[in-house]
Image (cartoon, rainbow, N blue to C red):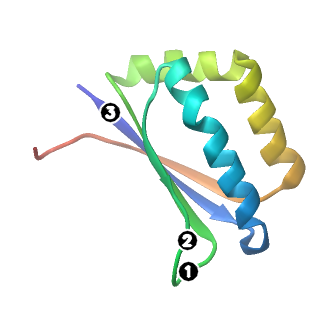
Amino acid sequence: MAATVFIRYQLDPFKRAMFEQYAQRWLTVIPKCGGDLIGYWMPHEGTNNIAFALISFENLAAYETYRARLRSDEEGVANFDFAEENKFILAEERSFLRKVTL
């Protein structure tokens, strides 16, 4: 069964530009490591500190393989370090979704 990871980020609203850089860097890394990146969404109007990402996988086992690849990928590690050093992500929540309609 396919699984989609829904990631909800709480951002420092004064560092949204850094989060956008972070999201852009994942465009090549996530597919290289085995994820089907549906996209990242950032605040436009309204709430200014919440962002989202959706990444799909064949199944949860594929997700676990992806996570291991991501943690050993040089560009992936550099992007995680960028986020940690700049502290623009204040909290991150993950939910695993399954598609119920076409």
Q: Are marks 1 and 2 in contact (CB under 8 Å)?
A: yes
**Number of numbered labels in the structure image:** 3
Q: x, y percentage for residue 15? A: 78, 66
Q: Are marks 1 and 3 in contact (CB under 8 Å)?
A: no
Nearer mark to the viewer, of 3 and 2: 2
Query: For the residue labelled by badge 2, is the local secondary structure a helix, a strand or a loop?
Result: loop
Residue name at image x 62 percent, y 53 percent: 92
Q: CA distance from mark 3 to mark 2?
A: 25 Å
Task: Report the side of 29 relative to 58 (left or right).
Answer: right
User: Is disc 2 surrounded by few (<14), some (14 to 19) or many (20+) residues within 10 Å?
Assistant: some
The residue wearing badge 2 is 43
Mark 1 or mark 3, which has the lower sequence index? 3
Q: Which label belongs to residue 47?
A: 1
x and y percentages locating residue 51 in the rendered image: 55, 62
Q: Nearer the viewer, mark 1 or mark 2?
A: 2
The answer to whether residue 88 is seen in the rendering is: yes
Q: Is residue 97 above or below residue 1?
A: below
Mark 1–mark 3 distance (CA, rounded to whole Å): 28 Å
Residue neighbourhood size for the residue with mark 1, other residues' Cα within 10 Å, grouped as few (<14), some (14–19), many (≥20): few
| Depicted 19 relative to depicted 79: above or below | below
- Residue 47 found in image quarter: bottom right
- The crowd level at tag 3 (other Cα within 10 Å; few <14, some 14-19, many 20+) is some
**Secondary structure beneath label 1:** loop
Under mark 3, the amino acid is Ala
